[in-house]
Amino acid sequence: MKKLTYLITILILSSCYKLDTAPYDKVSASSFWKTEEHALQGILGCYADMRDGNLFGQFFFYDNLTDIAMGYDIGFGDVIGGAITNRTGSIVNRWRRTFDGIQRTNHAIQNITAMDIEADKKEAFIAEAKFLRALFYFHLMNLFGGVPLYDETVDLNKDFNNLMEPRASEDEVRAFILRDLETAIGGLPVQYDTQHAGRATKGAAYALRGKVYLYNQQWDNAIQDFEEIVYNKSNNYGYALHTSYAELFNLKGDNSAEMIFAIQNKGGVGFPYGMPMAFYLGTRSTFGSCWNNGMPSTAFADSYENLDGTPFNWDDHFPGYTTDNNVKRAAMISTHTNGVYNTLPDTAKLGEIYRNRDPRMMETLVVPYSWYTGWVANQARPMQLVMATGVNENFGQIRNNRGWLTYVWRKFVPEGNLDGELTNREHTPFNFPLIRLGDVLLMLAEAYNETGQLDKAIVELNKVRARSNMPGLNSGPAWLAVNNGEEVFDRIFHERAVELAGEGLRYFDLKRWNMLEEVTGGGVIEKSVVGDNLLTRGFQSRHVLWPVPAQEIELNPALAPNNPGWE
């Protein structure tokens, strides 16, 4: 029963003990916060918020706002179309739910500080809560910029109607986050027993602090923190790249040595405590008949290199493909009648083309005419992604919910019913990484590159490529040569896309690189595999920072003025 103790505790805390409400529903505040076990339960209750869809529970959807994915409806369709206002639900709810998480951590810190328990245990619990508070504030800052700061001195029983702080500057918020992470690094253990897998560790705090520094272009500080855990400077953290990229995103790699900090998910009968990857990234062929509100973009699929590291170009296989939609359709489209094919493209040739690409492509995407084990009519069934209209899972074909001819996600999408582990399409039991070693190595490479240490940057990049059997940069062939910082950055730009696809990080990468408007600016049209127009992006420069919700400014006028373009 993996993660059972941990998840039962979260269940208890999240369903019957609300840390951020008073009076308490089921547990008296005067009888709680007395023992070490109470402190543990209070801390684990803080983790429960992370699976909320408006905090990190649908974090994968942020990729839809970038060059590598697209979506509709709940998949940030309003943001993609540029239709958001300062009252849009997806904006308002993310502000509020993240502050809910912050208030839980504040409540825990406040009460644990006053508890009569062993000093070292108290220090560790407080450090854990401050790690989570730092994580929540970092997320808020990346979306909204400066936000009001509330710490454990706030008592919601007394102060609920007096939370009238103005917005702190981004520098002030960052300093607050860094102070919390300094405490976390000092008080957190290097590791826990396996029954507590997923709790924040010292290595996670170093990794998050390095990321905070990286986002602020404090390259030397970022290098110091990343090197600490990559090269085990002070402790043996034990992190290592998992041997299989594909396994990282299913049950086999849930708590591998690559996972530095991940949301712990659980499924199965009586345990609906997962995240909705199946529901929103799967298709009608996925368990429970799902919605593919998030899909890989065609341009992203085309960006995967050939297996030898050369750039991929469809014209090398079908002359005229990139400029002539008729060539695309001839290469890709099939016709059928009630599941019986009348015409098929050269699927053997297509299969060879896809198999000769970076292996992460077919481990991340379901590509045309490849297979996926779906769950239809309450049983496992082989399903094929067919480029045709009118396809249906009852014929063994993968159907895009919108009828679009696109790639779909394989990464994070469960196959079959996972031998009974999957019983609810809204609760995929795969852990979801917020920080993993592959990400840290690429961030370390970026920091090295920005400080002129190109050779060191290439070493870290090549570690990530080698795991997927991709040839190393500067390993001989001219097409793998990198000679200056700009060329290294181009490789980082590409490598972070293919390595971290589906993990929601691309949006924040593009923002910090000041490239969001360049690659998703209003008017960008997303295309189907065969060149059909699917959606037009409505990005505007003011969307770089989301607006502070109007309702929050009405409650607290000190939050004004709003972000640029939203005044």
Image (tube, rainbow, N blue to C red):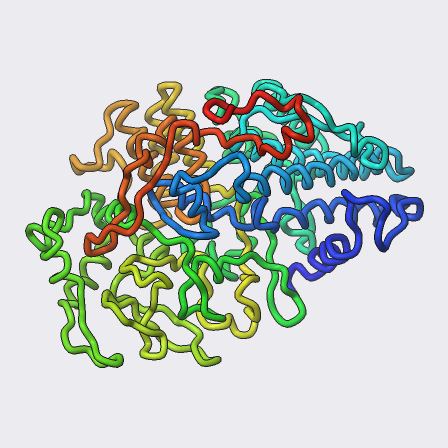
Q: Nearer the viewer, residue 122 or 145?
A: 145
Residue 353 visible to the viewer: yes
Q: Nearer the viewer, residue 101 or 554?
A: 554
At 55% across and 34% down in the image, what residue appears? Answer: 207
At 43% across and 58% down in the image, what residue appears? Answer: 281
Residue 22: percent from left, percent from top? 83, 44
Residue 400: percent from left, percent from top? 34, 63
Q: Is residue 73 above or below residue 96?
A: below
At 27% across and 50% down in the image, what residue appears? Answer: 298
Q: Is residue 158 above or below residue 322?
A: above
Image side of residue 64 versus residue 473, left or right: right
Q: Nearer the viewer, residue 339 or 360?
A: 339
Image side of residue 536 versus residue 460, left or right: left
Residue 166: percent from left, percent from top? 66, 21
Counting the numbered discs, the total is 0
Residue 529: percent from left, percent from top? 23, 55
Q: Is residue 306 above or below residue 145?
A: below
Residue 244 visible to the viewer: no
Q: Nearer the viewer, residue 322 or 157?
A: 157
At 6% across and 52% down in the image, what residue appears? Answer: 319
